[in-house]
Image (cartoon, rainbow, N blue to C red):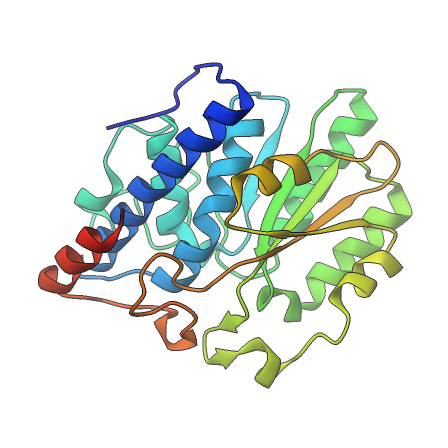
Amino acid sequence: MDTLGSMEIHSESLVNRLSGLANEARKLIVEMAATPTGCHIGGSLSVIDLLLGVYSKYGEDPNHLIVLSKGHSAAALYACLYLHGVIEENPAVNYGQDGSLLTGHPNHKLPGIPFATGSLGHGIPYAAGWALAQKMKGVNGIGVAIGGDGELQEGLCWETAQIVQAKGISNFIYIVDCNGGQNDGLVRDISPYHHLRGMFESFGFLVKEIDGHDFEQILSAVEPDPEKPLAVLAHTVKGKGIKAIEGNPHAHYAKISEKIAKRWRMGLK
């Protein structure tokens, strides 16, 4: 299996390498959807590029912390950690099975997972609090939380934004996987955001909007600002890479057959 390990790669090569790993990761996610338990395939496919990009930048330095707050996309996190060489076990083999550490939400007993997320909104204050602790200790550490636009309906997200502003936690990066979908439909139909960028700016964040599937944009965007916390609004496609489910909110969770999984894997270039 092709992994990044600890290799130092120039920027253009890194982008190309990440693109290749993203393809491998999507195949792993499809395989996890074909297990007896299935997985949250739609959001895993939308967030995987963000995870791979962020881990390539911050994942190997113990002074930094990365938390996947939208924990139902654990399949993507496991694929990312496997391809980065953080965990040794292929997650598609035992995902969701009794006794396996590869549970349906991130398992903190695995390397590279500092906090077990599941209840939406909880990973964001954890990462922000960790960043504040680093700042108070005088350590140059970045706290990164990766959440979702559906998750932003949790009040805890905005309570955290208020605290981040009040405490001046400029070493905090909040990446939002804006795939437009949630468990029971489209975000715009359930609880729309009329000016999401302005909402974060009102809390004192520097805001960057990017294509969440473009590695050059991802790597450039996640550079912290010395004065302000950073919010990255990453516009993504739910089910990205699998034409049959791209943009479909009903692909939030799926358990598919081996036959379908094989066809979808073959469609990935």
Task: Using the image as rendered, state which of residue 101 and residue 51 is in the foreground.
Answer: 51
Residue 188 placement, left or right of 173: left
Residue 185 placement, left or right of 89: right
Residue 261 sits in quarter: bottom left
Q: In the image, residue 236 lies at what x, y percent?
A: 52, 59
For the N terminus, give its image quadrant.
Answer: top left
In this view, the residue farthest toward the left is 259
Q: In the image, residue 137 lies at what x, y percent?
A: 79, 22
With respect to residue 168, does 204 lie above or below?
Answer: below
Task: Using the image as rendered, state which of residue 83 and residue 105 is in the foreground.
Answer: 83
With respect to residue 31, does 140 lie above or below?
Answer: above
Q: Residue at x 77, y 70 (%)?
A: 195
With respect to residue 159, does 230 lie above or below?
Answer: above
Q: Residue at x 38, y 42 (%)?
A: 22
Looking at the image, can residue 83 be seen? yes
With respect to residue 185, does 204 lie above or below?
Answer: above
Residue 136 sits in quarter: top right
Q: Residue at x 76, y 34 (%)?
A: 171
Q: Residue at x 32, y 43 (%)?
A: 23
